[in-house]
Image (cartoon, grey):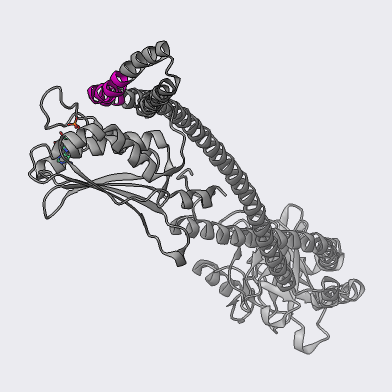
Amino acid sequence: MSSQQAPGRPVLPFWRRLLWGALAVSFITASSWLGFHLSENQGIASLRAESNHRLDLFASAVEGMVKRLEHVPATIQLSHDVLNLLRDPANPRRVQAADSYLRRLNAHVGSVSAFVLNDRGVVLASSNTDRADDSRVGEDVSFRPYFLEALSGRVGRHFAIGVRGEPGYFVSHPIRDGARVIGVAAIKISLEPIDQTWQMVGSPALLADANQVVIHSSQPGWRYTALVDLPVERRVDLLLTRMYNSMRIRPFPLSPLLWIGEDGQLVDSRGQAGPQQLMRSTSGGGMLVLSRPLDGMDWRVMMFLDLREVRTAAAFNGMMASVAAAFLLLLALFIAQRRRIQRQRLESRQLLERANAELEQKVATRTQDLTDANDRLRKEVADREQAEQTLRATQSELVHAAKMAVLGQLATGITHELTQPLGAIRTLSGNAIEFLKRGDMKTLSGNLGIIARLADQMGSIIHPLKGFARKSDPAPARTDVAVALGNALFLYGLRLRKEGIEVVNLCEPGAVTAWCDANRLEQVLINLVGNAIDAMANSPTKTLTLAADYEEADPDAGPPRWARIDVIDSGAGLDEKTLAHLFEPFFTTKTQGAGLGLGLAISRDIAREFGGDIEAHSRPDGGACFSLRLPAAASQETLTA
Ligand code: ADP
């Protein structure tokens, strides 16, 4: 398997998560702020649009009330009674006529009072002479700006509080006698009717004069307060002209986010001119201030709109915006998460496919390796089998060669064995001819019978040799150990007798049967018996003992497994060196020509070929013992059955 990491991105580091968290919080806060401000601006804009109309109506109403009588002073100069009075002020009849005129006029136009001043500012005639408390005649009002304005030839207009504390709008006009200003005509207009108009505004409103002092308001507390900080010289001026009588001008009660500039324009705290301005009230709710200058006057009307509702709605909208932003963030997070999971799945699949492909590649390589190894093994097996076959062939050759060598050794003995019968046959056959000539048929048939017996005897001598010399492939079968031992002893019969060896054969025919090839077993036994005879060549006692028995022959445990054949001699025995190399090919202690050193090596090979073995040891009382072990025929027959 590939050692690659599990797919997918690692978890974000803490600082990046913190950054993302801070960004999300900032986004939500910014959305909330934006929602609040947009909503607030929208609310203010619609409030302004709706209120502007009412303010216009209010301004028009005020204008109408104030300006309605503005032209009246100009008409006073046209009165002969007034002109005559100014020309002869000491004449009581003229004073009376002028007073009467003014009274009528005042009553007609509905002003508070109408009066005429001489060029020094003293009231000569008044509409109020019938009112003892407010006749005004003889009063010096030369300090009033409306007198000074008119004296200098202009129309004077301003608000002022009268000496008896009654506020009003004063309008004055110069009275000329030719080009010279000989007096001043003035009227005082009441502002009380404005109180009727507050209702149409519907919100707190005020009327401010040229000094930015509130001269009328729907809020009684705002009256005679200054919208701006009045400079000292202005205050002195106001005291001197007694514009507001002895009234103390207090600062406007709302905090000054707005003020009026020198030119009378409403400006905001940044100094920018504007028709309206936000204002923070002392209650902290916030107010929208709408302002209008009155046409042709330096007065202005102002309207104060409470923004609490707008702010509440904006706060709600800001909250909704933050909720929407949070929802959007969650949605984005969800989509990102989904995409991440899909990407991870894809990566996992790709990784798995890659790992699979790698695995398949490896399996294919291994399989190829195994196939190659298998092919090599098969070839080796074939080579081994070939070598084994060659070995077997060689072994057969060697066995045959060894047999031939034994036969060669036996040739002398057999020749000797056959010489006597042959000689006897020649003699008897010569005699037979003689007896035939003589017609002695009885003796002849006796001789011929002897010849026949001798021929049988010779045949029996030669017969085993024929089987022995035959070259054959091994074929395992039930083999009587006693028969094989008998054949081997027969071959060495002459030598045994010649060398005076006593043979003790403890093996009864049919007592022990082994599972092997009879020819090969004979070969092994011939070799062992031959070696034993050689070993006893110089021994004082010469005894060859042959024994055979079963091993593990426990009747309760089933048939015996092994057949054991012991070839025991009374020769020199086996020293350590001989024991160590006994079964090695070409190991021999015999003189050159006497032995090849192959007998025991081949014999062990043959025994192992049938599943058995050969072991050798020196006997304590002298001599050697060679034990040949082969599978018992009974056990093999049970297996193959
Ligand atoms: P070879 O008979 O041609 O020498 P073998 O393989 O048959 O070859 O025997 C090898 C050697 O083992 C013999 O040369 C001999 O020294 C020793 N040997 C074999 N049998 C006996 C025995 N019965 N007693 C003592 N030595 C033996």
Magenta residues, dominant SS class: helix
Measured as percent of width and height from the top left, residue 181 is found at 71, 58
Q: Is residue 353 above or below residue 125?
A: above
Q: Is residue 422 magenta?
A: yes
Q: Is residue 412 magenta?
A: yes
Q: Is residue 172 above or below residue 409?
A: below
Look at the image and tell me whether residue 122 can be seen: no
Q: Please, which residue is most extreme toward the right here?
A: 108
Magenta part of the chain: 403-424
Q: Is residue 527 left or right of residue 378?
A: left
Measured as percent of width and height from the top left, residue 263 is found at 62, 56
Q: Is residue 630 left or right of residue 313?
A: left
Measured as percent of width and height from the top left, residue 630 is found at 37, 46
Look at the image and tell me whether residue 593 can be seen: yes
Task: For ligand 1, give the image quadrant.
Answer: top left
Measured as percent of width and height from the top left, residue 324 is found at 70, 61
Q: Please, which residue is most extreme toward the top here?
A: 437
Q: Is residue 131 left or right of residue 515?
A: right
> Quick one: 63 or 638, which is closer to the camera?
638
Q: Is residue 160 left or right of residue 554?
A: right
Q: Quadrant of residue 582?
A: top left
Counting labels gives: 0
Residue at 68% across, 57% down: 331
> Quick one: 59 or 370, which is closer to the camera?
370
